[in-house]
Image: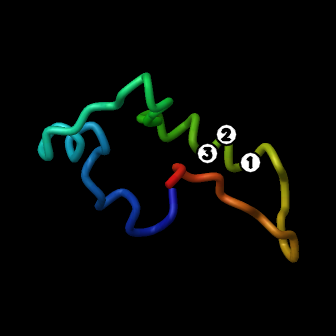
Amino acid sequence: MPPGLAALPPLREVIARHGLTAKKAFGQNFLFDSNLLDKIARVPGPLSGARVYEVGPGP
């Protein structure tokens, strides 16, 4: 895990603290398993010099 990332509060705690919930109708999903996040990040392999696009929420 990158330095400093461990100091962040768990996402589940942040979501609950602010009274937020994921809405299936909006296709919202939250990943709580850091092992799964690491695996997703490793799948594409090295990306040095590559263009990477984040697909975020709509307007």
Q: Residue at position x 36%, y 27% from top? A: 23
Q: Position of residue 43 (x, y in %)?
A: 79, 43
Q: Quadrant of residue 37?
A: top right
Which x, y percent locates residue 58? 54, 50
Contact, CB < 8 Å: mark 2 with mark 1? Answer: yes
User: Distance between the Cα atoms at labels 2 and 3?
Assistant: 4 Å
The amino acid type, in three-letter code, at marker 3 is Asp
For this view, does 54 lie left or right of residue 37? right
Marks 3 and 1 close (CB-CB < 8 Å): yes
- Circle 1 residue: 42
Could you tell me which secondary element the residue under label 2 belongs to?
helix
Horizontal side of 23 relative to 52 (left or right) equals left
Pick out the residue farthest to the bottom: 49
Q: Which residue position holds label 2?
A: 39
Residue at numbered disc 3: 38
Say how the picture is coloured. Answer: rainbow
| Marks 2 and 3 in Cβ contact (< 8 Å) | yes
